[in-house]
Image: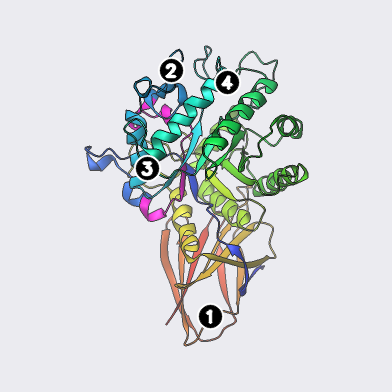
Amino acid sequence: MDNIRIDFTAPVGAVKPLHAVNNAPVYKFAADQRITNLEPWKAAGIPYGRTHDASFYATYGGEHTVDVNMIFTDFSRDPDDPDAYDFVLTDEYLDMMAAGGTECFYRLGSKIEHWQKKYNTLPPADFGKWARVCEHIIRHCNEGWANGHHRGIKYWEIWNEPDLDPDDSTHKRCWGGTAAEFYRLYDVTAKHLKACFPDLKIGGPACASVREEWWKGFFANVSTQPDFFSWHVYSATVEKIRDKIHMARKLLDDNGWQSTESILNEWNYVRSFRGEDWYYSLKQEKSLKGAAFIVATMCMAQYEPLDMLMYYDARPGGMNGMFCTDRVCEILKGYWPFYMFNHLYRLGEAVAVERGSADVWAAAARGADGQAVMLSYFNDDDASPAKEVRVELVNVANPNGVRVEYYLLDETHDCKLVREEIFTAEHFAAYLTMTLNSSYLIKITAL
């Protein structure tokens, strides 16, 4: 029997925003309401939405959305001229995000370009001018410039995956220059933006992986300490993500950047990006297995040196395990982990968890509205058998008894109440039979 022990009098800090995502809900303000996922999006309480790859999706505005070169379309023009910018569809996209109750995490730069000819991932002709363009995008979003808004966007990320391809590659998908050129672009831009907006969080560079050599080159050539350092990892095991979290934090700390937030802002279940394993991964991302991986990763990350998780991707597409791509109002299994984790997030304070299991992961929280536990049985071996799990609940706030409700996510239940018990003790245990890839949200409320 696997054992999980929760101590509700052992606080370990705030519940972190681990149910953030890339992109926004699908919602056109004058559109047919049957094509929207706005209401379930709001119910999941998504705290942040990163704007990367938004311009792949037509309903967001497609090629006219978010990316710097799609807003400032003619680089020969004056960056101080409001008429040189096209904000219309970007504004509508950001309005969609706001309608979902989600804060924007704005990626400055371009979407990935897989095609042979590159358009927007090439190094800007003038790094200083590009920085000034970014400045005016921020002023439009936050200060009302150019008939703009006052959105209060805090996070501004410079570029995406500049380390994805080596300098000698003939097919660079995210950054068409060398590493040294990118370090200079980042340094020029970060220095300018931080001078203009000292209270905003300026960072990046959304590294494709945790590669020590590339990171150390970045550290050595950047003179403005980032407010956050963002990076990516895709994996078929929770343990690999955990190891990368520790590696990233150590690299930042060893460089003296202890106050820089570490943000993992692209992640999902992937065995491999090649061959049959890639097709298998895409299928699992939209299945119960993908959902269990999400729950397990969120639970793990709550107790590791990481500041935010941002799932890739909530944009309708191949890697969206939350909503049906063809009919976005149809909820998939991968939506429910975000809904479940939001219950812990709203409680506010995480408490200690002791795991006596290699593949049952758990997180727990307490707050004014009660206490809760989220747990998942995930193993990449699809032949793993069902197991018995003992969840020991210690120091439960219990003045007059508590109601314990068990909400199950498995092949036949979508976070549905399947069991209810009353306890009058402060220390008791729940016994669960968990099939592979099943998850529970356990709510504990006072009578």
Q: Which residue is mark 3?
A: 150
Instruction: Please tell me in which quadrant of the rendered image residue 396 appears.
Output: bottom right
Q: Position of residue 381 (x, y in %)?
A: 64, 47
Label 1 or label 3, whichever lies nearer to me, is 3
- Mark number for residue 63? none
- 2 or 4: tag closer to the N-terminus: 2
Q: Position of residue 238 (x, y in %)?
A: 64, 49
Q: Quadrant of the C terminus?
A: bottom left
Instruction: Examine the structure image and report whether residue 289 is included in the region drawn in magenta.
Output: no
Q: Which residue is mark 1?
A: 397
Q: Which residue is mark 4?
A: 127
Q: Position of residue 270 (x, y in %)?
A: 59, 38
- Mark number for residue 78? 2
Residue type pointed to by label 3: His
Task: Report the span colored magenta.
Answer: 42-62
Instruction: Please tell me in which quadrant of the rendered image residue 223 appears.
Output: top right
Residue occupying image coordinates x 60% and y 80%: 395
Q: CA distance from mark 4 to mark 1?
A: 57 Å
Q: CA distance from mark 2 to mark 4?
A: 14 Å
